[in-house]
Amino acid sequence: LNIEDDTSGLSGSIQDLIPLQGDLFSFADNSISKVLPAESIDPENLHPETRHSYQKIYSIGCNNSYVARTIIQTKQILNSIILNRDLDKQIILDHAWSCSELLFKCEEAHYRIYNEVMKLMHECDAIVEKGKNKSIIPTLPQVDDLEGKVAIFLGNAKRFLEKTHEFLCLFYNAPNSGSNFQTYREWMAKNKPDKANIIKMLEEDKDWINQIASLRNAHEINHSKPQFDVEIMNFKLNPGNKGSTPGWKYDFRARQGSIQTEFSDILTDMNVYLSNLLTFFEELLICCIQDSSDKNYNFEIYKQIPENINKKCPTIYFVSLKKDF
């Protein structure tokens, strides 16, 4: 079965084949496809002429850091360690895939906004500059459905945090607390006090996690109300004939939160959140695996030095012999 790029017609360089949630997925350099054997298309073999096929589902692949550092890295680590007998590696991998897909949607929403902003920025600058010599500056072009794209980003970001926290249920039998992230922290501190690394991590990350959850809830399509909302600004003309790129600001005072008085750049903030989400997934899962691995197995998880990272599949963590072994 040859996986081809649907735009160039060239064969894709497949880096990995991974069974996930009952299906087989092909991870190439620049795409992810679901493999469709003839047996899955025609399970009763009523049409012997049925061909094998595949369905491209993402236009990102192993050279994308979000793909490499979520599902690919998880698979590589799980394949290299021995877990306690009550843990099923496939269930963990399937759950990691659910998390990964939510993060891919966040990145796509960010990219769509970024792509439009880059295209419109120079056009806006040109309109403003030309208008300075006239009595009026015409309307500025706008990012299409900016509110909707932000809602997609925030909705998937919050859901990603919920699914990632569910690793605590798989590894430590914590009760599923949904979006009540504080309950997870309190349960771990009370019931697993010896898991110091993960308890410390959850405590250190709580502020930005709550920030994302509040931004999502305060969005106008969800639960916004006076003193609990997020204001989103598109391209705008400001005093002094100066244009500004899309931004946002929030007011969380109705829920004992803070208020942001000035707009901040929406793309910069989203990029920071994406980085935090990815790192949170990596570190939480690694803590879970370390706590649940066979201690007689003389291997450890290490972080790759930058110059050794493979650009075709830029995973960060790997398993190797313990340095003191």
Image: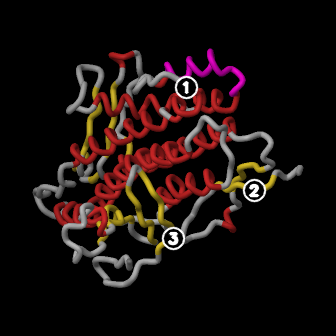
Q: Which mark is residue 15?
A: 3
> Which quadrant does the N terminus fall into?
bottom left
Q: Which comes sooner in the sequence, label 2 or label 3?
A: 3
Q: In the rendered image, which residue does mark 2 sit on?
A: 320
Left or right for 75, reference 273:
right
- Identity, as a three-letter code, of the amino acid under mark 1: Asn
Considering the numbered disc 3 on the image, is that residue within a helix, a strand or a loop?
strand
**Neighbours of disc 2 within 10 Å: few (<14), some (14-19), many (20+):** some
**Neighbours of disc 3 within 10 Å: few (<14), some (14-19), many (20+):** some
Left or right for 194, reference 146:
right
Q: Is residue 15 above or below residue 317?
A: below
Residue 2 visible somewhere in the drawing: yes
| Residue 229, image quadrant | top left
x 38%, y 79%: residue: 2
The mark total stands at 3
* Bounds of the magenta segment: 182-195
x 24%, y 51%: residue: 235
Q: Position of residue 302 (x, y in %)?
A: 72, 52
- Identity, as a three-letter code, of the amino acid under mark 2: Ser
